[in-house]
Amino acid sequence: MSPAQKKVRKKRKVRSTEHPKSSAELFNNRELGWLQFNLRVLHEAQDKKNPLLERLKFLSISSSNLDEFFMKRVGGLKRQIAYGLTPKSSDGQTPKKQLQMIAKLLTTMLHQQQMQMDQFRLELSHKGCDIVTYKNLKPADRKFLKDYFLKQIFPILTPLSVDPGHPFPFISNLSVSLGVSLTQTSAVDDDKIFARVKIPKLVDQWIQIGETGRYIHAIEVVKAHIAELFPQMKVKGTVVFKVTRNADSDREDEDTEDLLSMIEEELRQRRFAELVRVEFSDCTDPWLKTFLIRELELKEEDIYDMPAEFDLVDLPQLVSQLTWTGDKYTPWSPVVPAVLSEQISIFDQIKKHDILIHHPFESFSATVERFISEAARDPHVLAIKMTLYRTGDNSAFIRSLIEAAEAGKQVVVLIELKARFDEHRNIIWAQELESAGVHVVYGVVGLKTHAKTSLVVRKEEKSVKTYAHIGTGNYNESTSRFYTDVGVLTSDERITTELIELFNYLTGKSMKTDYQHLLLAPINMFNKFKELILREADHAKNKRPAHIMAKFNNMEENDISLALYEASQAGASVQLIVRGFCCLKPGVKKMSDKVEVQSTIGRFLEHSRIFYFRNGKENPLDGDFYIGSADWMYRNLHARVEAITPIYDRTAKEKLWDILQSYWNDQAQSWQMKSDGSYHKKQVTDHKAIAGVQAEMMTKALQKITLTEDDLVKDEE
């Protein structure tokens, strides 16, 4: 650990223990808060108000979420125990105690997943889709599947046996495998041989039997024909199992000179990281589980039952094959903001006033993508600077940046190589951009760059003018269609001048700290947020309007929580819309009486970060609004590069106020948090709003303009 890290961690520990109350009285546990969030996701799979096929997707998401939770959170706790470390969480729990707490709640969650999958089988069957097992098939169906297996699956499979000449095979992260026990035809059971067959994801995981509505999983087909892989051997039994490995990194990148090489090496090592979970499904020979537990050196707490005989993350592939009408969400095509539907330069429009965009209700491609693509083609543009945290495959942004560089423009891109699970893609983009002449940098040593910013420098008449986009979401066309985010396009010199300084900080050695407008982590953001919160406390004490509203993903910064408690005790109203976990305790007498916390879950992943402070003003719209990339989490405020911008434009403020009020007043999609960290669904009293806040946002977007992304595509064609 570097001296800087030690200093930060020591400082954090001291701050979290200065309050007279105990840690457990002040804060909820982060890990349990995350599991509570996943239970809310699972509830969407159980809620019959959602279309059936969308509910299947929610069940898959809850399973995928758990995979990541084990890889990152459980993996991190187990590594701490293995290293003999005993750091306590914000609520005062040791790693060992937290693992025990996690296991208890996981039992409930896994049982609910299993019960819901059983329910889905019945519901799908009533609709004409039967998930079948091989043993219940007729001879004609079995013949069809054998032909399919021999032609489509058999050539890909690679059986790996264990014997004196073949060591136990490496089993990669998140792979689903079939363990097989074998004997020679004349041998006794004591001479069993183990073999592992990986179920390849390259083949269709769901196979439709003929033209019927019956579907069978690839695992079932492989199991039924496993003897084909072992001629002259006798198959004694099989077991389906899935391995999860640790993805919690213990790298110390402060001392790494070549970040690109270090990340590439970590990606190679991740496949070989220690096991944190093994899930077992159907087992027809107990010897197999005993063998695997021994060879993988599993402890009892590492072993879990799979909720089904297949991986639940495969369910979306089944959904994609079912084309029933009425069982999916009505397709949504984002609208184009009215100010950008005119056929004039986007820069001329931004010069008139700031443009606030709310995705996916408003188009990403016709706003943010257009901002960069038009800059790439505009002969008056001199430079483009951009931060890329996650971007999609075949990214329009990458193409535009390359086009701009080839046209002779100065193009600088900060690519975050440490964006977890996107490292490989970002390495490829970095190399491709460099090959095209783009200046690629990897940010500030020791800090992950999470800011969502872009800057365009344009020659206009006799001066140079700068334009900017600052948002809450990644520059990713794919996720922009199902993540809710906000962003602002602006030419306000108060913002763009300081954004130039931010890029100098990222690419050079700028030590500027006196930012007057932008909130930047780790420079001034934490102190500024704390100052804004305590300012509301002061207003409340002096009987002036005092109100804090914030919408973001997760809440875990202890000092921010303590400041919010102080604001509440002074009489300020605090309303937080936190999608995921929240370690702050709302509604505690004499501590957080005036703090309320909600969570919204729906068809779109809530991802926007909006912050509001009334600042003693009679008219709420005269208060201070901010948007940007950071949650109220320790890592965002202290250990990452983040950017949050104030919103000065009156129309943009009105739009943000409407978003906050709509989400807060929602009844159909929102949950209220209790002080113990549990949640309950809000009661629906206004049945006109039964569709929920996200549907409300779609309706409002359509009322403002009738041009959609689909219309733009037609026009271009």
Image (cartoon, helix red, strand yellow):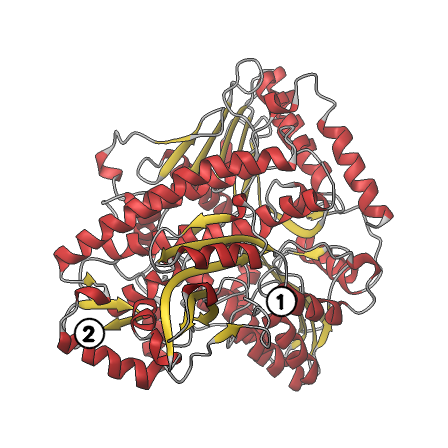
- Residue 319 on image: x %, y %: 28, 64
Is residue 426 depicted above or below 407 in this figure?
above
425 or 644, which is in the foreground? Answer: 425
Q: Amino acid at mark 2?
A: Ile
* Residue neighbourhood size for the residue with mark 2, other residues' Cα within 10 Å, grouped as few (<14), some (14–19), many (≥20): some
Q: Secondary structure at mark 2?
A: loop
- Report how far apart the C-alphas of labels 2 and 1 lie in the structure: 39 Å
Q: Quadrant of residue 541?
A: top right
Q: Secondary structure at mark 1?
A: helix
* Residue neighbourhood size for the residue with mark 1, other residues' Cα within 10 Å, grouped as few (<14), some (14–19), many (≥20): many
The answer to whether 195 appears left or right of 539 in the picture is: left
Q: Amino acid at mark 1?
A: Glu
- Residue 627 on image: x %, y %: 57, 47
Q: Are marks 2 and 1 in contact (CB under 8 Å)?
A: no
- Residue 684 on image: x %, y %: 27, 32
The answer to whether 669 appears left or right of 162 in the picture is: left
404 or 252, which is in the foreground? Answer: 252
Is residue 559 depicted above or below 552 in this figure?
above
State the mark number for residue 423: 1
Q: Kindly tell me whether residue 308 is visible in this rendering.
A: yes
Indicate the quadrant containing the C terminus: top left, top right, bottom left or bottom right: bottom left
- Residue 242 on image: x %, y %: 46, 59
- Residue lying farthest right? 3
